[in-house]
Image (cartoon, helix red, strand yellow):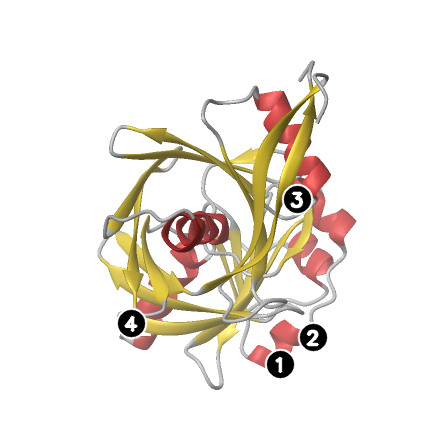
Amino acid sequence: MTAQRRALPAYQIDAFASRAFQGNPAAVVPLEAWLSDSAMQAIAMENNLSETAFFVSEGEGFRLRWFTPGAEVDLCGHATLATAHLLFDVLGYERDQIAFETRSGRLTVVRQGDGYAMDFPASSLRPHQRSLDLNEALGAAPVELWDGTYAMAVFKSAEEIIALKPNYEALSNLNWWGVIATAPGEDCDFVSRFFAPAKSIPEDPVTGSAHCLTAPYWAEKLGKTSLKARQLSKRGGEVGCKVLGDRVELSGKAVLFLEGTIFLPKEI
């Protein structure tokens, strides 16, 4: 390293996965002090993963932020899981619970067997009038449409979810920056796919935050509070869900894939 650049440790972790090449890869960058927003956004764009997480020590826990290649976001499940895995299994964090302060309030993560359980806020949904624009963008018409943090389009079967061939340009022009397509599962309680081309994520492999909407919906629909969910992306991933009033416990595993160094130009 020369005097013209700074070095930062960086990790890539597959979240909601029991082995590498599954689940959703997230980059995690530990910081001693915050970089500028533009520097973190540039790193996320360079990583070109659906999320890059940055964290700094704060009080007895950590402050955590998430960036897609296109923008900072308010909530990200898989990058939170990846950060917890890094702290617990790589960096030697010794307490039983990690508390993250975020744009969505305090999120806590605890070990659960060989995985982790995350305490997230549940998201509310409102029935929405059917949208021809959404139907055309997804290439199919859902039986129900709900409005919340994201649009949630409900279909009859997992086969319909698998068969979707979205028009990403059309999706990026909708009022919602993220769209969930979900249906009852065959060997699980429910399945989903998630699209966010407006945030530079055509299809996200496994989306923790989407389950803050889908889990309460399917919990009420199925009459149960503990559910097993599967995201039907090409990589695939499994998410355990437990609905606890206005909170949702999301659980899953994670695997370290890559450890390296980011070299920043001196002027950033």
Label whose residue precedes the other's in the sequence (4 or 1): 1
User: Residue 159 bears which disc, if any?
Assistant: 1
The amino acid sitting under disc 3 is: Leu
The amino acid sitting under disc 2 is: Ala
Badges 4 and 1: C-beta atoms under 8 Å apart? no
Q: CA distance from mark 3 to mark 4?
A: 32 Å
Label whose residue precedes the other's in the sequence (3 or 4): 3
- Residue matched to label 4: 226
- Residue matched to label 2: 163
- Residue matched to label 3: 174
Quick check: can you spot residue 70?
no
Please identify, in this view, whether the residue under mark 2 or under mark 4 is nearer the observer. 4
Q: Residue at (30%, 70%) from the top-left corner?
A: 113
Q: Seen in the image, is 70 located left or right of residue 239?
A: right
Residue 166 higher or lower than 266, as above or below: below
Expressed as whole percent of the image width and height from the top left, the position of residue 90 reads: 44, 52
Label whose residue precedes the other's in the sequence (1 or 3): 1
User: Residue 250 bears which disc, if any?
Assistant: none
Badges 1 and 2: C-beta atoms under 8 Å apart? yes
Quick check: can you spot residue 153?
yes
